[in-house]
């Protein structure tokens, strides 16, 4: 593999727990990858393996063509941002952003011999640090805030300072672990745009770890879906959403959980003599006048811009249909018909794997 950063057949075990199970994942130059999966599937461990905060039990970690499997986190120079980004409360924005560079200089100075040399070199570095901080402040629109302390900033501004602090040392990649989890809905949407724009401007490879499929779908160029320590599908957001490789992935991705009609429940699609389960997203399943499946309305829930109908279909399968806008709604207990366009159907074989529907 030739990407900026990659894991090659990496396994990480903690005692009897296999947190990461033979993963190969590449982060190319300039690419934005989201690692998406439910809590406990091994996402954070994968990120920590990339960063050098964990050492692989098996396999290799490569950075720009070099094997860094045994290299320390500081040798890899990978920027990290976590859910709680804890700025230093007693330092100004300027000092917060400068901190990683100051720490790096301190480490370097400790290795230098003569004190005289140290002070002239330190002055030159002070100027470099100031310049680097000014550039980050410009990129993240923080110029006006450089002399404030974190307590005098809004949540969004604090987030931007944390981003600036993570990126100021010109990292080889930027890894973000659930950076939006603590934000309210509006700030979350704004920060998504902010992070995407930052990726475009910096061109660094970004790896975002999230359990939130909206974060992954809206920000990433490529999504790697993780289940139980394995990457089970990688693809663009549209590929993952429109062609999920398995029933498990299909029901995980999507704001509304995909409806699954088990094989035999009202439809008769076959493949190699075996029946297929059918999937259809609630937004694609609508009330129709004739044809389709018969179902009874069990409940109706109003959510503002949309209303969710819960219905009992053939073989007692529970289905959901999302109705948008001001459409006429049926009554509870009413018998209705449900239809979906053939293009919106997904088919899955007995073992849960996707099958293409041929007409
Ligand atoms: P995620 O980020 O997807 O929630 P993690 O990578 O944090 O998942 O954890 C994956 C699995 O590895 C879990 O079962 C977790 O309990 C286990 N695990 C993670 N870190 C450690 C550790 N330091 N020691 C023991 N088990 C761990």
Image (cartoon, rainbow, N blue to C red):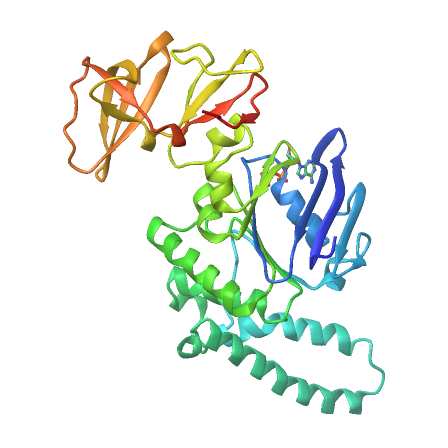
* Vertical arrangement, residue 147 with respect to residue 10, above or below: below
Q: Quadrant of the C terminus?
A: top left
> Is residue 62 visible in the rendered structure shown here?
yes
* Vertical arrangement, residue 248 with respect to residue 80, above or below: above
Residue 49, image x, y percentages: 71, 48
Q: Which residue is located at x 70 percent, y 56 percent?
A: 5
Q: Nearer the viewer, residue 23 or 188?
A: 23
- Ligand 1: give its quadrant: top right
Q: Which residue is located at x 65 percent, y 57 percent?
A: 28
* Vertical arrangement, residue 145 with respect to residue 240, above or below: below
Residue 166, image x, y percentages: 58, 65
In the shown orientation, is residue 168 left or right of residue 71?
left
* Vertical arrangement, residue 246 with respect to residue 65, above or below: above
Question: Which of the 4 image quarters holds residue 22?
Answer: top right
Q: Which residue is located at x 56 percent, y 44 percent?
A: 235
Q: Nearer the viewer, residue 149 or 352?
A: 352
Residue 38, image x, y percentages: 54, 35
Question: Which of the 4 image quarters holds residue 78?
Answer: bottom right
In the shown orientation, is residue 212 left or right of residue 301?
right
Q: Which residue is located at x 16 percent, y 26 percent?
A: 329
The outermost residue toward the right is 113
> Is residue 53 visible in the rendered structure shown here?
no
Question: Which of the 4 image quarters holds residue 223?
Answer: top right
In the shown orientation, is residue 342 left or right of residue 66?
left
């Amino acid at each position: 593999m030739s990407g900026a950063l990659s894991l090659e057949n990496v396994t990480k075990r903690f005692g009897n727990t296999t947190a990461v199970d033979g993963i190969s994942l590449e982060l190319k130059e300039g690419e934005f990858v989201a690692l998406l999966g439910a809590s406990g599937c091994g996402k954070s461990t994968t990120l920590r393996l990339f960063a050098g905060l964990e050492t692989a039990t098996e396999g290799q970690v490569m950075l720009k063509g070099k094997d860094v499997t045994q290299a320390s986190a500081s040798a890899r120079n990978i920027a990290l941002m976590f859910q709680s980004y804890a700025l230093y409360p007693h330092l100004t924005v300027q000092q917060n952003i400068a901190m990683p560079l100051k720490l790096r200089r301190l480490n370097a100075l400790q290795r230098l011999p003569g004190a005289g040399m140290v002070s002239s070199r330190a002055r030159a570095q002070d100027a470099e640090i100031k310049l680097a901080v000014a550039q980050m402040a410009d990129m993240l629109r923080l110029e006006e805030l450089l002399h404030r302390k974190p307590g005098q900033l809004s949540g969004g501004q604090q987030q931007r300072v944390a981003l600036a602090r993570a990126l100021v040392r010109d990292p080889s990649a930027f890894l973000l672990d659930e950076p939006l989890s603590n934000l309210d809905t509006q700030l979350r949407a704004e920060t998504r745009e902010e992070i995407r724009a930052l990726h475009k401007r910096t061109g660094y490879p970004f790896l975002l770890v999230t359990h939130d499929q909206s974060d992954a779908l809206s920000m990433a160029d490529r999504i790697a879906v993780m289940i139980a320590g394995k990457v089970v599908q990688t693809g663009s957001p549209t590929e993952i959403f429109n062609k999920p490789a398995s029933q498990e992935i299909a029901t995980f991705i999507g704001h509304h959980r995909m409806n699954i009609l088990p094989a035999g429940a009202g439809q008769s699609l076959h493949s190699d003599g075996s029946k297929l389960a059918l999937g259809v997203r609630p937004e694609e399943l609508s009330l129709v006048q004739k044809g389709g499946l018969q179902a009874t309305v069990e409940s109706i829930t109003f959510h503002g811009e949309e209303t969710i109908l819960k219905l009992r279909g053939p073989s007692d399968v529970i289905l959901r249909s999302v109705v948008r806008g001001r459409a006429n709604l049926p009554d509870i207990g009413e018998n209705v018909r449900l239809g979906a366009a053939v293009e919106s159907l997904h088919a899955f074989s007995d073992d849960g794997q996707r099958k293409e529907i041929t007409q």
